[in-house]
Amino acid sequence: MNPILFDDLPIRTNLLPLTFTRPVAAIRIGILTIAEKWEQVLGQPVSFATTGFLSKKYKKTTSSDNLWINGALCPDENIVAAIKDLKPNSLLLKDSVILAGRNSKAEPPEAILGNTTEYAQNIVLIDQPWKIFQQNGNQIRSDFKRITATRQSSPITDPHTRVYKPENIFLEEGVILHAAILNADNGPIYLGKKAHVQEGAMVRGPFALGEESVINMGGKMRADTTIGPFCKIGGEVSNSVLFGNSNKAHDGFLGNSVLGEWCNLGADTNTSNLKNTYQNVKVWSYAQNDFIDIGSPNCGLIMGDHSKSGINTMFNTGTVAGVSCNIFGAGLVPKHIPSFSWGGADGFDEYPLKKALATAERVLARKNLKLSEADHHILSFLFNEHTR
């Protein structure tokens, strides 16, 4: 069978601004992206069925036996078995949501006319941005179990690093530790290839640090946090997810938050993740074009790719910032910041596409990378479609 991870349109819309620049399955939760989880459990590569302007970067491969899997669905042993058991021209549903389908045509699963099965067990479906941090601790645990099974951790050789429950700690090759505290009493700690934990950093599991990412001196990493690959992190971070190539290198608090790629939070940027009234948080919904109650009192910042904040920026509880925003100035910024915005509490101007692209090119050049033609197309499309 040929696995294709498809975007369920309502879910994709719910997950904006994170899905402005990626398919749903490219979201990172736990240690891996959803796509990487499926590649691991299926033992083969996957492709993506996503919206048109993303399809140049995220390609779809079809065959005579296609296995369509909802890109928001996180795998577990039971759902994987049920999907593998699908017969040709059949669907697996949960509360009217298509979880998976199998057919012989290059048509999406909605076009399948055949047997349908209602899946009776619980699932983890990432259909809202806040579910990324809410489910992150459990996903770290499951990813950790799969990634480390039958493997040996690299040793901790630094005599000044203090470790609690070492059997719950896994180091990939090349990890550097200096006088850190790793507490895995309540959940696993995973340190990716060539990751660096600097002096005085404190880490509580469940926690994941991606390849070549750095925790700066004195960083305080609370539980249920994932720092994706090629990030720099510092200050205090709690129950948050950075997809990759993003930085929060300085002091300041980040809690119950999700940051895309190529984001940067300036020194002493802080997020509120709990209202003084302890009421449920309302968050901007692109699907509803309004603020909606998320059913929880905890939510910090949801930030799309290529967005930045200046020093001392203050984000209100449940703030949503789009793609390529430049946010700065005194006072609490608005709770919804549209893509390609330039400004802060005193108001926003449009961030011209030419300047946004130039900034993105400079940011990537710092890592000896170039903005690809596909990424240039994505940002240009978003500017033309979402700032008009």
Image (tube, grey):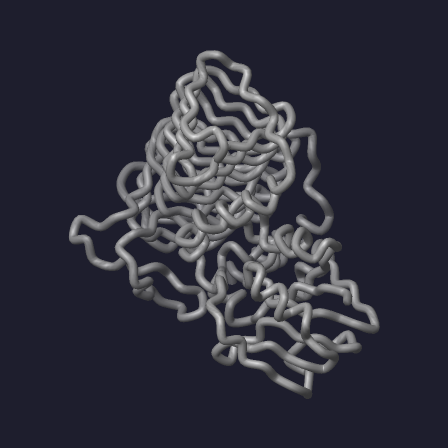
Q: Residue furthest right?
A: 64
Closer to the camera in the image, 27 or 78: 78
Q: Residue furthest left?
A: 277
User: Residue placed at 56% from the left, 57% from the top?
Assistant: 20
Q: Is residue 117 above or below residue 251?
A: below
The quadrant the N terminus occupies is bottom right
User: Residue placed at 43% from the left, 27% from the top?
Assistant: 182
Closer to the camera in the image, 333 or 210: 210
- In the rendered structure, the answer to whether residue 67 lies left or right of residue 97 reads right
Q: Position of residue 342 (x, y in %)?
A: 44, 45
Question: Quick check: can you spot residue 352?
Answer: no
The image quarter in which residue 25 lies: bottom right
Q: Is residue 343 above or below residue 27?
A: above
Q: Is residue 324 above or below residue 384?
A: above
User: Residue placed at 62% from the left, 64% from the top?
Assistant: 80
Q: Position of residue 92 (x, y in %)?
A: 60, 77
Q: Position of residue 158 (x, y in %)?
A: 51, 14
User: Residue placed at 63% from the left, 23% from the top?
Assistant: 174
Question: Quick check: can you spot residue 117?
Answer: yes
Q: Residue furthest top?
A: 159
- In the rendered structure, the answer to whether residue 71 lies left or right of residue 203 reads right
Closer to the camera in the image, 34 or 318: 34
